[in-house]
Image (cartoon, grey):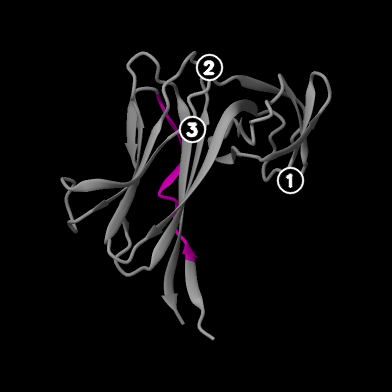
Amino acid sequence: MSNLTKTVQTELLGIQTVTAGSNVKSAIFDCSTLFSGTFLVDFAAINAQATPAATEFCIQTSQKNTGNDTWVNMFTWLSSAAQAASLTVSAGGGVAATTITLTPTLGATNVYFFLKNGTLTNSEWPRKIGISGGGPFVVTVEDGFTNDQSAAVGWNVAERYKYDVDFSSVRRVRVTINNNRSAALNRDVVVRCALITADSIT
């Protein structure tokens, strides 16, 4: 039976803050010998800007092997434009813990939330699966925390995206982030972009 070899590539964009009014481009990835790729992109708003502008994400390709004059969008989407609120951690959130106590609460539509660690690379996007209490609120997450989040600052506008891209007729790809869609309403955000590729059949 044939097996499809896959690789978790080096992150195209390591976790980083994209300040209001900024544009960021990922590393260019050479996909010329690969079958396909799954892009996994994380987003969180870390500023309570009222009526904020959404952040624009693009997965791009080019018809040239080099140069930057022919990039074209394959997939484009916008983040949530909901106003973000910070969340205070008052209990829980330790390594492997599955509960964390937050004030104020998370809304019913907040599937993910963001915990901004003092060391940014230790931050996490946990998935909420339950909530209890009347303030502060105990939030149950799907998986135990990888890092200690007991002193993190929470944010309630956070999203995770997945896009599957056929590489059979493209040679290189990149991800761009436009956080400058409105001069007065941009806000600071945190992003990360990973890529898993289907490489060969053995």
Measuring 67% from the left and 42% from the top, which residue is drawn there?
Answer: 147
Farthest front residue in view: 109
Q: How packed is label 2: few (under 14 Cα within 10 Å), some, or many (20 or more)?
A: some
Measuring 47% from the left and 42% from the top, which residue is drawn there?
Answer: 192
Q: What kind of element bears circle 2?
A: loop
Task: Tell me the tag on residue 144.
Answer: 1
Q: Eyeballing the image, is 155 above or below 43?
A: above
Select label 3 or label 2 by which is in front: 2
The secondary structure that most of the magenta stretch takes on is: strand
Q: Is residue 114 magenta?
A: no
Residues in magenta? 7-19
Q: Distance between the Cα atoms at labels 3 and 2?
A: 13 Å
Q: How packed is label 1: few (under 14 Cα within 10 Å), some, or many (20 or more)?
A: some
Quadrant that contains the N terminus: bottom right
Number of marks: 3
Residue with the mark numbered 3 = 190
